[in-house]
Amino acid sequence: MESPITKSDISLQKMREVKRLKSVEDKRVGSEVFDRITLKTLYKLANQGHIHLLNGAISTGKEANVFKGTDDKGNLVAVKIYRVTTSDFKKMQYYIQGDPRFNVRSNNKRQLINNWVLKEFKNLNRAYEVGVRVPKPIIAKNNVLVMEFIGDENGTPARLMRQSKISNPEYVAFKILDYVKKLYNDAEIVHGDLSGFNILMEDNEPIIIDLSQGMVVDHPMARELLNRDIDNLIKDFKKIGIEISKDEIKRKIMDL
C-alpha cells in the first residue's frame, strides 16, 4: 500500500498513514521513526514539493531508515529519517565535536541529530560538487534528509558492493580510490566509515553513501579515519581479487 503525503491541507492524523508502509512491520519501530515532530517535518517537505509518496523502506538501521519515495513531479527520491530514540548520541558527539562547521554545545538529543543530518547533507554536497559519485543531496530538514534515489527507473534500489558481483574489479577499485582522492584533496573531507557496506553498485559504477560521520581533513582525527577507510578498502578489494598495499593507496590518494 502506498502512503500519500499530499500538498493539500491535511491533518497530522492523516500524516500518520505513513506508518502503514509495507516494510515497517513492527509497530514499535514505526512509532520510533514516525514520531510527531518527524511527521510535521515530512508534512513541511511535502508542502515544498520534495516528498509526495513514500513507497517502502530501502534500508533499516539502528539509527536511521531510508525510504523510497517520489517528489511532486514523480521523480524517485530517497528519504533518510534518523530516529531520536535509538541513535548513538555519544558517537554523534564524538564525530561532530571539533568540526569547525558546527558549534554544538547543547546536549539536546534532537538538536544533535538535526546537526548530524545537516553534516551529512554538507558532506554529500561537498563530494557531489567535486565529482564524487554520491547521492545528490536535495534538502535536509530536522531529522530528515532527502536525496537522489540510486537504482533503476523501475524503482529497484542499487545493491551494496558487498552484495554485488563485480564484473570489472580493477575498474571499480580504481574508481573508488579516485573518489577517495577527490574527497581528500578537493572536497577536503574523509569518509570515516568507508567499506563495501557504504558503497552501492549501479551498472558496475560505485556510488559512495553514508557520509554522516565524514570529517574535514584538518580535524585531528582525520588521518586516523583515513587509515581506517584504507584498511577496510584493502579487505574489500582482496575479496574481489585486487591486491593493493596500504602505502600504494596512500600514494594514490595523497600524490606522494
Image: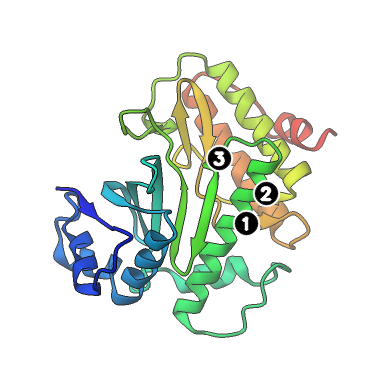
Is residue 184 found left or right of 158 in the rendered image?
right
Residue located farthest toward the front when viewing the structure as drawn: 8
121 versus 231 height, above or below: below
Which residue shows up at 44% across the image and 67% down it? Answer: 143
Q: How far apart are labels 3 and 2 at the CA level? A: 10 Å
Q: Where does the C terminus fall, quadrant-wise?
A: top right
Numbered tag placed on residue 23 in the rendering:
none
Callout 1 secondary element? helix
- Place residue 253 in its image quadrant: top right
Say whether disc 1 or disc 3 marks the residue closer to the N-terminus: 1
Residue 128 versus residue 176: which sits nearer the camera?
A: 128
Disc on res. 134: 3
Proximity of marks 2 and 1: CB atoms separated by less than 8 Å: yes
For badge 1, the amino acid type reads Lys
Residue labelled with disc 2: 126
> What amino acid is labelled 2 in the image?
Arg
Q: Residue at x 38, y 48 (%)?
A: 71
Give the residue drawn at x 83%, y 33%: 255
How far across and how far down the image is residue 124, in percent?
A: 59, 49
* Above or below for 148 versus 172: below
Residue at left offset 45%, top offset 28%:
201
Provide the residue designation for mark 1.
Answer: 122
Callout 3: helix, strand or loop? Answer: loop
Occupied quadrant, residue 176: top right
Q: Is residue 224 left or right of residue 6?
A: right
Asked which secondary structure carries label 2, the reply is: helix
